[in-house]
Image (cartoon, rainbow, N blue to C red):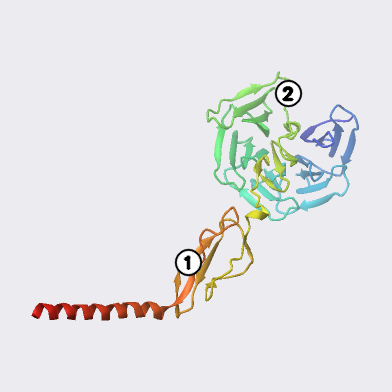
Amino acid sequence: MTMVKPVAVDFDPNQGFIFWTDVSLNSIHRVRYGGSNYETLITDVQVPDGLAVHSTLQRVFWTDSGNDRIEVAYLNGTGRSTIVNDGLNKPRAIVVDSFHGLLFWTDWGSDAKIERSDLDGLNRLVIVGTDLVWPNGIAVDPKENKLYWCDASLQKIESSDLFGNFRQTLVYGSVVGHPFDVAVHGQYLYWTDWRSENLKRINRFDGTNQVEKVGSGVFDRAGGLHIYEMDECGSSPCQNTATCVDYIEMFVCECSNGFQGKLCDIALPTIQSSSICKLPKLNDNVMMLEHSKDEYSPGEEVWFVCDSAKLLIGSASVTCQSNGDWSDSLPSCIHTGILVGLPVLFSILLFLVLLAVCYYCNR
């Protein structure tokens, strides 16, 4: 195994390969975890400063600040192609957000910036373009929709959302040192420091910005940093025969039919055939509003009307119940002339009674 000046590093958990770039050998290599199956995958690169693996799609991405481009290939080195080759000036770190299908990279050229794109290099967007000098390492937390990066010249570590909004300085000054790469794991943000023999970390959530040194102090200008927690799906968190999809720092359950929820542990309600209400048999002259089907589910309503010459007697609507019955008896329609005649007849009778009473009083 030949190694002169390794810089960027990443890991493929599916096949167990560690990938790295070597800026002295101008090449990209891989070896299985444990030291076997060493291969030189890519040559003919000038300064491969950054590297990122998409284990699900079986792709490796890298930056080349000598040729000012971003390339991609299969994990065995075949199918090499360039996806970004314009508007770059010393691209450095690159990271894959496999959950959202995005690439993020830093560029520490004369127009320092942080960009993102789709995995094919399209829909490219500058998300941070101010107050940067040497943006080196970059890391993404897809669960929190957070992006982290370090600037070696400004001695800063910052964060934002995935669009560059809500930018925040987490830690700055001499305590940061000369940061080269950053990585997220749990509540901590880790980074390598060319001026320290240790890794460093802060709690990215508690707001204390207390820097801790990690490890036994064996590094000499440590470069790329990658942290991988093996097998997010190893504990079989998904239920009811759901499929667990492993992402970095998270997992997603793809639910079977009839279940929902983060762990697919919630059964969807089922409608039994006996709870279906059949189209009601209408009384004479009664019409349904918007009749469009013959069967109704519990909770659905049916509304009724009469034509302009008739009056609806009874409930104007009924609701399908869980036992398959309607909530009320069906209405009927009657001619309005019957109702108009009743008060007229009553008025005549009342007049006759009053006349009789008046005649009696005069005697």
The residue at the point 73 percent across, 28 percent down is 222
Residue 293 vertical placement versus 43 (above, below): below
Image quadrant in which the N terminus is located? top right
Whether residue 25 is visible here, answered yes or no, is no
Image coordinates of residue 352 in percent, x first then y, are 22, 81
- Residue 122 image point, x, y percent: 72, 55
Please state which amino acid type lies under the numbered disc 2: Phe
Amino acid on which disc 1 is placed:
Ala
Nearer the viewer's eye, disc 2 or disc 1? 1
Res 149 → quadrant: top right
Q: Position of residue 245 (x, y in %)?
A: 74, 41
For the point 18% across and 79% down, which residue is it? Answer: 356
Q: Nearer the viewer, residue 236 or 55?
A: 236
In front of the other: 266 or 45: 266
Q: Which residue is mark 1?
A: 316
In the displayed structure, would residue 140 be above or below residue 2? below
Pinpoint residue 91: horizontal percent, then vertical percent.
Answer: 72, 45
To which residue does mark 2 refer? 219
**Front residue of this view, candidates 286 and 197:** 286
Q: Residue most toward the left?
A: 363
In this rendering, the answer to whether 214 lies above or below 30 is above
Image-quadrant location for residue 300: bottom right
